[in-house]
Image: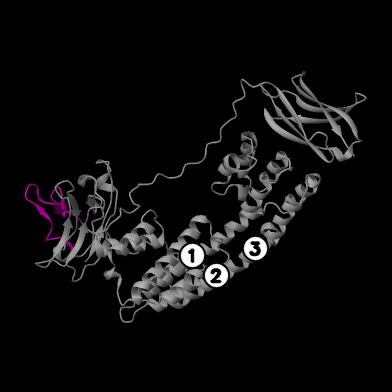
Amino acid sequence: RGYIGEGQCVDPVERPMKGLHFQCNTNTDNETNFWSRHVSGGGLIENQTIRTNQGLSTRPADNTFDQEVGRIDFANDGCAYNLIGYWWANPDVPYKPIYVSTDPVTGACVIESNEVNGVLITRPANNCASRLSRVPGPIIGIAELAEAVEAEKLAYADARYLYQQLIDGGNKDEVLTEIMSSWPQDAWELRQYLLSKSPFLTVEVLQDMVNKPGFPMAMKSEVCIANPDATKSEGFVKWLEYDAIYPMPPSMIASIVASWDNKTFRTQLENTLADHHDEMTQAADLWMEELTKDTINDPLDSLRMVWQEVRSPGARYAEAISYLQIGDFATAETVVEGIPEEHELREGELDERGRMLALIDFMETVAGDNRSEEDLTVAEQDALELQMSPHADRPAVWAQNLLCFHYGRCTPPVTGGESEPKNAREIRTPFLAEEQPMLVVLPNPATAWATFDYTLTATPQEAWVVVIDAQGRTIDRMRVNQAQGQLVWDTRTVAPGLYHIELLNNGQRLQVEKLVVKP
């Protein structure tokens, strides 16, 4: 069948350079070598195309073609609207597409050229060489690459063991239990306990802490600030402001974001893990590249051996799909279910694994009826498309390719910038211009601690929260450095009785509240 491409780029200015780009493919005995096809489900023909420039004058396309009568080198659906410009370099055999789509109005729908302004296009050195990033130094053999993979794997394992012993104190369940069992009067002990395990607390632990009732928001903020590696995780700040049971004020969130510039030992350890994993996967990539040069024996078993050395979900899916393609469904399922324990899968990743297991079951059912992937019923095609089409993960893409290749039910790939990149979240500065000075004291009465929530309408200038006892003596003074926030006062150090809490700014007393401290 050859190579089938679907794309979708509405902007006519961007269409020449966005979408699928075929560069170094080889065709042998294919009825259609290349095929720019319509996307299933309708839409304007002029908006449905692969990249309209295939190759460049500075880097020509080095695809090879059959160039045989009765075969199509380059087919182009909707060619009256989607003219393909194809740049190639001598020799014309086998690099020139000879048999291409034509249209009665426009003529050739694939406009090929091997020159620019009368000057022949030249082929750059190593035009189709591997784009893998090689480690510095001379090219080494298979045995040395295998040793490099094993050495980096052991180094990664050592760093991973240390990391696991430090993260959440080596026992996440114990930390979560401590949070859930602590009562409000134990807030100081819980605060100290969590800070002692920082900066190695996980997002899950921080979320349980934030959702805990009776734990002062200032303490929650303090613990979050002490764990910048976790709070930097994607979506945590948004959850903190909008989805937490007790949402955190923007001023405290801004302080948490400001802590991200701090480099901790956890940061260094995670960078070490990343470095070892990167070196391991680079060596594995080069190892596989050497194995695929074997033109005598099928290297599939050797490639699986390399994949098994790399402990990552991507390697597990690659290995599973290789078993799926030869009909070994039981082994494929075992591989997917055995994704390494150190990879704690998030919701989307769990969904991906579920879809992969569903795809394996689906294909096993088809094979059990002595049918192949070319023999799906319309109902089965519908079910597979419904389950996979909204997604762009590994099992979804594999299933979508199957539907497109065998049944012409094609989905535009995620290429050419269809999805906007995620933007950094903008931290909003709280708008306080119209608010009145406010001081809220909770809980009241207090036994172990009290919080002072304050809001100022002007920039703090010698701003304080002052605690005064019944005899008029100043017991404590806490500096206020921002327009809005929360302070925590330890009431265990003072005698039971009545206290006055004053909010001061620039010499003015803005508000006074009473607080009762009980034994």
**Residue 506 appears anywhere in the view:** yes
- Label 2 or label 1, whichever comes before in sequence order: 2
Q: Where is residue 100 shown, x and y percent of the image? A: 13, 58
Look at the numbered disc 2 and give the secondary structure of its residue: helix
Q: Where is residue 161 shown, x and y percent of the image? A: 64, 66
Image position of 351 (left or right of 429): left
Q: Look at mark 2 in the image and give the residue it sits on.
A: 153
Where 407 falls versus 18 (above or below)?
A: below
Residue shown at 88% from the left, 29% from the top: 498
Q: Are marks 3 and 2 in contact (CB under 8 Å)?
A: no
Q: Judge by depth and name the residue closer to the eye, 361 or 259.
A: 361
Q: Look at mark 3 in the image and give the residue it sits on.
A: 164
Q: Where is residue 357 shown, x and y percent of the image? A: 44, 67
Residue shown at 56% from the left, 42% from the top: 238
- The amino acid beneath tag 3 is Gln
- The amino acid beneath tag 2 is Lys
- Quarter assignment of residue 475: top right
Quarter of the picture holding the N terminus: bottom left
The magenta stretch spans which residues? 95-121
- The amino acid beneath tag 1 is Pro
Label placed on residue 313? 1
- Label 3 or label 1, whichever comes before in sequence order: 3
Q: Is residue 119 magenta?
A: yes
Image position of 436 (left or right of 112): right
Q: Is residue 19 magenta?
A: no
Label placed on residue 3? none
